[in-house]
Image (spheres, rainbow, N blue to C red):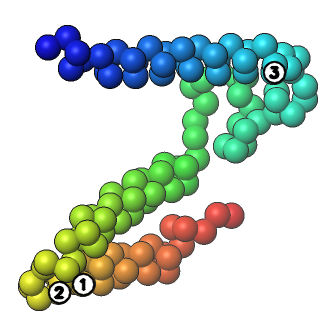
Amino acid sequence: MQNAYLPIVIFLVVSIALAVIIFGASYLLATHKADAEKLSSYECGFDPYEDARNTFDVRFYLVAILFIIFDLEISYLFPWSVTLGTLTSFGFWTMALFLIILTVGFVYEWKKGALEWE
């Protein structure tokens, strides 16, 4: 019974040792002095060292919500594409209708200007 768990124990020991080696090497080899580039704003356009309660523009939330919605809807394509060979025509046309609705929603958001950044 103990021999059945030996590969798992070896895997855990090797993975922990490898993680410690990689973390230690990155800590020892990396430069630790901050320059102007590291202290500058990153991607969002806000100064990272101000008050955390600053208000965000609603466009950040809109883009995030649209990304989550389309990302979740597109995730339905993977199981459909895996089982496409065994689906009936009903399953195929159901997903085709879903993709049409997804495309109509995308075009609607595009025409409304939700994807434009001023």
Viewer-nearest of discs 2 and 3: 3
In the rendered structure, find residue 93 and report the number of the disc placed on it: 2
Residue type beneath disc 3: Ala
Look at the numbered discs 3 and 1 and tell me whether their residues touch, using CB distance below 8 Å. no
- Identified by mark 2, the residue type is Trp
User: Label 3: which residue?
Assistant: 30
Q: Is residue 113 above or below residue 62?
A: below
92 with respect to 113 (left or right)? left
Q: Which mark is residue 20?
A: none
Inter-mark Cα distance, 2 to 3: 54 Å
Q: Secondary structure at mark 3?
A: loop
Residue of label 1: 96
Q: Residues within 10 Å of mark 1 (few under 14, many from 20)?
A: few
Q: Residue at x 32, y 22 (%)?
A: 7
Q: Is residue 40 above or below residue 21?
A: below
Asked if residue 73 shows in the view, the reply is no
Q: Amino acid at mark 1?
A: Ala
Alpha carbon distance from label 1 to label 2: 5 Å
